[in-house]
Image (cartoon, helix red, strand yellow):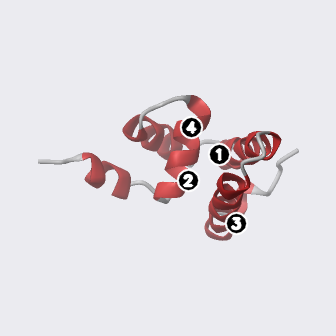
Amino acid sequence: MINENDILDMTCLTRAQIAAISEHEHLDDVSAAELGEYLMHIHHGPQQVQKMICEDITEALHAHDLPKARGLYLALKEFLAEHPEALRGNA
């Protein structure tokens, strides 16, 4: 039987990246994983994921939540290292 961990592990995103999508879109982790996986396979989808994480960082900074902003920054840094296509064509 497939459980939540199996679903999260089947995506090309890390748990931190899924959590960022989850928070940004107000979704549960499984739905966020599904959305993230979908976005990673469409035109300009990786840029949308990158934008979500950047917006979450901005929100955390405006809320003076530096630990959260640092964690999101690390998720973004890892995301861009694994998915450099997220930078190309991002305006």
Q: What's the distance in space between the residues labelled 1 and 4, CA to CA?
A: 12 Å
| Residue bearing mark 1 | 49
The numbered dot on residue 31 is none
Characterize the local packing of mark 1: few (<14), some (14-19) or many (20 or more) Cα atoms within 10 angstroms.
many
Q: Which residue is mark 4?
A: 23
Residue identifier under label 2: 17
Earlier in the chain: of badge 3 and badge 2, it is 2
Amino acid bearing label 4: Glu
Marks 1/2 in contact by CB < 8 Å: the verdict is: yes
Instruction: Identify residue type, mark 1.
Output: Val
Please, what is the three-letter code of the amino acid marked with disc 3? Lys
Specify which label sits upstream in the sequence, 1 or 4. Answer: 4
Could you tell which of marks 1 and 2 lies nearer the N-terminus? 2
Question: What's the CA distance linking mark 3 and mark 2?
Answer: 10 Å
Instruction: Report, in whole angstroms, how far the alpha carbon at label 1 lies from the one at label 2.
Output: 8 Å
Can you tell which mark lies on residue 77? 3
